[in-house]
Image (spheres, grey):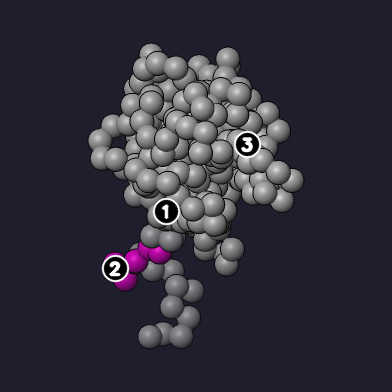
Amino acid sequence: RDGRFATQVWVAASGQGRVMVTVDGSLDGLWEAAGYGDSGWQRGQLGAGYDSSKGNAARRLFSPLIGAGLDVQAAMFEEQSSCYLRVPFNLASAAGVLRLDLRMQYDDGFVAYLNGVEVARSNVPAGVPAWNSLASSNRSDEAALSFENFALSVPAGVLLDGANVLAVHGMNSAVAKKETNFVMVPELEAMIALLPYDGLVTAIDDPDQRQADDDPDGD
């Protein structure tokens, strides 16, 4: 923060979210929207996923990323390829956003939405994903453990004063025993203009309207 701009974390990696591993397409086109009712979804601390790797804890690389309440192993491992995540956040004002960045830890692919509008995707096929879509390829664990940054271009009017939601459709590349892990951990950060500078500068063109102290040095 330098007096003109401020960085705000709208969604923290340790924030609260809700997940659903669906078994059909009944939520298609609905679950991404800000006003969708997700009270029946699994609730907990970010991130969401599972790690069923065998052996000692050191082999379960994703376990430290999965928050309390958002382990989806029972519903997803060897059963489904996709998982839906919703993370609500509130804005006192949606104005003045200069830059918006989504950072993701993910395995294997995802599509992200703000209030129902797609804003980012990675390692997924083209087109609108289905409830059982697969990621395009298997992603290495090493890559998934690091945050990847996505600079977002958000159309005017998408962000709202008050309640908003970041929704993420995470996908594995297969439904099989070899898919021993899955994870999605989002962070959303904004750079905000603190002052409306254009409104602070007023030119006085008519000399008759100037006050004596408007130009103290007489130039």
Residue 167, compared with residue 217, is above or below; it is above
* Total marks in image: 3
- Indicate the amino acid at tag 3: Ser
Q: Please name the residue that numbered disc 1 is placed on.
A: 150
Q: What element carries label 2?
A: loop
Residue 202: percent from left, percent from top: 38, 63
Marks 2 and 1, the one that precedes in the sequence: 1
- Residue 120 located left or right of residue 166: left
Q: Nearer the viewer, mark 2 or mark 1?
A: 1
Badge number at residue 52: 3
Q: Do the residues labelled 2 and 1 touch (CB within 8 Å)?
A: no
Q: Nearer the viewer, mark 2 or mark 3?
A: 3
Which region is colored magenta? 201-208
Magenta segment's dominant SS is loop
Q: Which residue is drawn at 42% across and 46% down?
A: 138
Counting residues from the N terminus, which is met first, the one under dot 2 or under dot 3? Answer: 3
Which of these two is toward me, 151 or 218?
151
- Amino acid marked by disc 1: Phe
Q: Which amino acid does label 2 sit on?
A: Asp
Q: Residues within 10 Å of mark 3 (few under 14, many from 20)?
A: some
Is residue 98 shown above or below 63? below
Residue 204 in magenta stretch = yes
Q: Nearer the viewer, residue 108 or 215?
A: 108
Which residue lies under the disc numbered 2? Answer: 205
Q: Where is residue 82 in the image (x, y as percent from the top left)?
A: 45, 30
